[in-house]
Amino acid sequence: MTEQPQNLPVHIGFIMDGNGRWATEQGLPRSAGHKKGAEVVRTVLEHAKKRGIKVVTLFAFSAENWKRPKSEVDTLIKLFRQYMDEDIRELQKQKVRVTFIGDREKFPADMSARMTEIERETAAYTDFHVVLALSYGARDDLIAAIKKIASDILDRKYLISGIDETKVRDALSTHDLPYPDLIIRTSGEQRISNFLLWEMAYAELYFTPIYWPDFNEHDLDDAIDAYSRRNRRFGKL
Ligand code: IPE
Ligand code: IPE
Ligand code: MG
């Protein structure tokens, strides 16, 4: 590992892409890619924590991913269930805060209830925070925020002129997180696919051709090193 960079990201968002192509190239069913992908999450979280990252948001299932064939959606739901039973239990033991963004009501009732329970059980942990984006779409989140703001105005909590960045930020499901500093997308696709649109306005973007199931701690180090060498100007000189 290279020397500890000075400018560490606080919050990293991962667009974990390429599970299917990884499996297909190995002559395996796509489900094998998702399974391996879940194992990689374990390694990456462990390493992120070790590197001093405070918040990790994992894009695991988008609002649009419901449009995939039912068999694939079922496989993914089974994996999330297993992940909640095994991996999240382990994270809880390590005092990791775990929360969820996205439309949890789209999942079976016992799963959404479990998500809420996990959030409650880990709410007091402050060292490391893992956010799972499940059935998440940034546009949906912005629509919900706009509705909330409109309803606050109708309730006369503030005037239209009182809408500012803080009001929008507070109305988003990510209101309790710092904005992401670094967004990493695997698999070679160079797009955002409806992830954290508002929040990533000034994030550094890092695209790697590596498929998610092949992504490892060295690749995370490379991304963090690249981040630490960048000059974030936020519009200033
Ligand atoms: C990412 O891998 C996981 C999810 C989106 C659920 P993909 O399943 O998108 O894999 P590719 O992009 O088809 O290779
Ligand atoms: C983005 O991957 C969503 C997740 C990683 C969960 P997709 O595979 O769904 O994105 P597109 O369809 O290539 O844009
Ligand atoms: Mg994909």
Image (tube, rainbow, N blue to C red):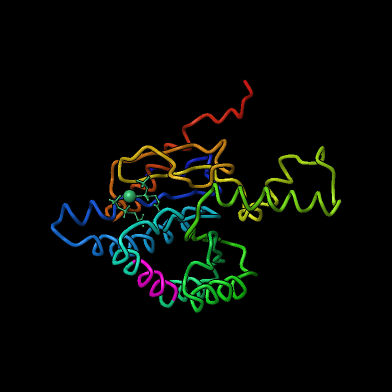
Quarter occupied by residue 19? bottom left
Residue closer to the observer: 1 or 72: 72
Residue found at x 64% / y 23% = 236
Whether residue 226 sits left or right of residue 27 in the image: it is right
The picture places residue 60, in percent across and down from the top left corner, at 42, 58
Whether residue 50 sits left or right of residue 24 in the image: it is right
Q: So how many labels did they put on this image?
A: 0
Residue found at x 38% / y 69% = 77
Residue 175 sits inside the magenta stretch: no
In the image, residue 145 above or below residue 119: above
Dominant secondary structure, magenta: helix
Which residue occupies the extreme top position in the image?
237
Residue found at x 39% / y 56% = 65
Q: Which residues are magenta?
A: 76-84
Whether residue 51 sits left or right of residue 43 in the image: it is right
Residue found at x 47% / y 61% = 134
* Quarter occupied by the C terminus: top right
The picture places residue 75, in percent across and down from the top left corner, at 31, 68
The picture places residue 8, in percent across and down from the top left corner, at 52, 44
The picture places residue 222, in percent across and down from the top left corner, at 37, 42
